[in-house]
Image (cartoon, helix red, strand yellow):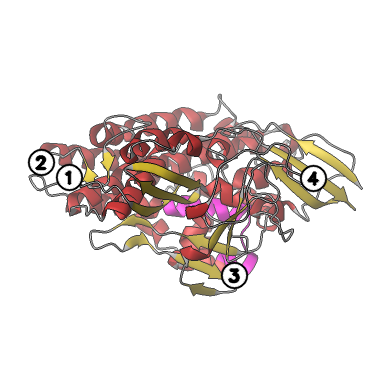
């Protein structure tokens, strides 16, 4: 038996340390440490409630729009504010812009470059993959970054800037659009769609979104050359390297539901998926366990939670809290969203092999196709000349919850206002769910579970690549984790 400490990880937002214990050529236990404390929840105490719209997005410069949406939803819930349809569609477009950029940034710049490494030099696909995906020098990075820059013009038009926009408010979006600007939005999304159809998939988006079982996915793969489709390239190397056998956690998935409609329903469903069943999400069952965190306090629901550092806490090994749903660990992210939403291919993949490295990437790319098609519909639904925002009336005594889905998974803000000031503010970010430490009952977090049983040499080799694939499959954002 031996122990290995891995970290820092390259191409990961923020600081991350993973300690693994190995026995008989496999990981027997894992401990995940978020070593950077930031304290945004403390900064918000005593501030005017609307200041959350300024501070909360600065939790992260990668998913700041998601933080803006959650903060605006929390204030809207506290004030009883309503958002006009134009505001709903505009916020969805802004949010989708950021989420899809995150998905493809992960795929092209964080995940795929690992397969250009020398560890895979003997594989028949290595030279082609290295030319396409090698960090900095591969052809894919330049193509994607150009497409990304053009796609982000949508953010500039609707949100003013990125990151840390103030366009998203409790009553909607402050930026109305003209008929000409609506056409421009359509052109921006159309250009991004062409990039997806030409390079990412090599197929129309409708064809990707319609993949409804494993047999359909295999038929599609057989007719698409890896040299002409980055998705097909991924499927080929996933098969060859056994990514479907890496990184399986507890297979309990949660989604808050994402992209609200004018009537309150979400484009992707809310709920929990476990043991082949969909169940209603009870947010009152969410607690924050601090038994293994450098935090003071006890296990509490987030509305009563504290953010008070206790670096001397016994048995602690991370600044990350351990959020739990009815005492159990859940996995969040694109895979969770799609399985909860009932996407048939993803449900069959999860039924066959669970949550794993391959399935997380497939879900992320499939979601990219589905959301891009939804963006076309949201642009068509905009009605220039009608309100995009309705002013809201603040209240001195109230509380609210703002739930949304960032690219990496479920994001929640819990807000309490007393005497017109923020009395308490708690944030549970996606990576807090996925990269949590153990709880008081000794249950590991999702990544800690996913790392167990991973094949690994017992010789203390530095940064085993299988472990890196598993960590990166969750697309961690560590600066959000402890905010």
Whether the magenta-drawn stretch holds residue 361 is answered as: yes
Q: Is the residue marked by circle 2 packed among few (<14), some (14-19), or many (20+) residues within 10 Å?
A: few
Q: Position of residue 283 (x, y in %)?
A: 47, 63
Quote the CA–CA distance across marks 3 and 1. 46 Å
Q: Earlier in the sequence, mark 3 or mark 2?
A: 2
The residue pinned by badge 4 equals: 20
The residue pinned by badge 1 equals: 391
Q: Which residues are magenta?
A: 349-367
Q: Residue furthest top?
A: 137
Quote the CA–CA distance across marks 2 and 1. 23 Å
- Residue at (24% x, 51% y) in the render: 88
The reply to whether residue 204 is visible in this rendering is no
Quote the CA–CA distance across marks 4 and 1. 52 Å
Quote the CA–CA distance across marks 4 and 3. 28 Å
- In the foreground, 375 or 328: 328
> For the residues carrying marks 4 and 3, which lies nearer the camera in this image?
4
Q: Earlier in the sequence, mark 4 or mark 1?
A: 4
Residue 351 circle label: 3
Q: Is the residue marked by circle 3 packed among few (<14), some (14-19), or many (20+) residues within 10 Å?
A: some
- Residue at (18% x, 53% y) in the render: 84
């Amino acid at each position: 038996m031996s122990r290995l400490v891995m970290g820092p990880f390259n191409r990961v937002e923020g600081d991350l340390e993973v300690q693994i214990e190995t026995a008989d050529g496999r990981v027997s236990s894992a401990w995940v440490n978020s070593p950077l404390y930031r304290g945004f929840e403390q900064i918000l105490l005593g501030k005017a409630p609307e200041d959350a719209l300024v501070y909360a997005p600065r939790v992260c410069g990668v998913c700041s729009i998601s933080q803006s949406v959650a903060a605006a939803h929390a204030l809207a819930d506290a004030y009883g504010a309503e958002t006009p349809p134009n505001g709903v569609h505009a916020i969805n477009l802004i949010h989708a812009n950021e989420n899809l950029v995150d998905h493809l940034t992960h795929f092209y710049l964080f995940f795929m470059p690992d397969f250009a490494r020398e560890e895979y030099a003997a594989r028949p696909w290595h030279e082609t993959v290295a030319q396409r995906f090698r960090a900095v020098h591969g052809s894919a990075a330049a193509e994607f970054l150009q497409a990304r820059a053009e796609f982000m013009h949508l953010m500039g038009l609707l949100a003013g800037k990125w990151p840390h926009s103030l366009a998203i408010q409790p009553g909607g979006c402050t930026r109305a659009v003209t008929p000409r600007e609506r056409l421009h939005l359509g052109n921006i999304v159309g250009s991004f769609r062409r990039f997806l159809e030409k390079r990412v998939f090599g197929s129309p988006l409708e064809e990707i979104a319609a993949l409804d079982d494993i047999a359909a996915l295999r038929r599609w793969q057989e007719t698409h050359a890896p040299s002409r489709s980055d998705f097909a390239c991924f499927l080929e190397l996933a098969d060859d390297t056994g990514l479907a056998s890496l990184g399986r956690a507890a297979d309990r998935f949660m989604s808050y539901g994402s992209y609200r409609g004018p009537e309150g329903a979400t484009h992707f469903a809310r709920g929990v998926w476990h043991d082949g069943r969909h169940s209603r999400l009870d947010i009152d069952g969410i607690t924050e366990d601090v038994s293994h965190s450098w935090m003071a306090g006890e296990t509490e629901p987030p509305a009563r939670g504290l953010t008070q550092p206790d670096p001397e806490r016994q048995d602690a090994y991370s600044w990350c809290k351990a959020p739990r749903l009815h005492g159990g660990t859940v996995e969040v992210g694109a895979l969770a969203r799609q399985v909860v939403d009932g996407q048939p291919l993803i449900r069959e993949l999860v039924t066959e092999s669970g949550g794993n490295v391959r399935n997380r990437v497939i879900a992320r790319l499939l979601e990219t196709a589905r959301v891009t098609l939804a963006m076309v519909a949201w642009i068509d639904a905009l009605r220039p000349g009608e309100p995009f925002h309705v002013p809201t009336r603040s209240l001195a005594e109230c509380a609210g919850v703002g739930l949304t889905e960032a690219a990496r998974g479920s994001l929640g803000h819990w807000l309490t206002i007393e005497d017109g000031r923020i009395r308490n503010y708690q944030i549970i970010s996606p990576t807090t769910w996925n990269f949590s430490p153990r709880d008081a009952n000794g249950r590991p977090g999702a990544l800690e579970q996913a790392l167990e049983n991973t094949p690994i040499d017992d010789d203390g080799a530095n940064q085993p690549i299988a472990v890196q694939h598993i960590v990166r499959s969750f697309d961690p954002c560590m600066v959000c984790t402890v905010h």
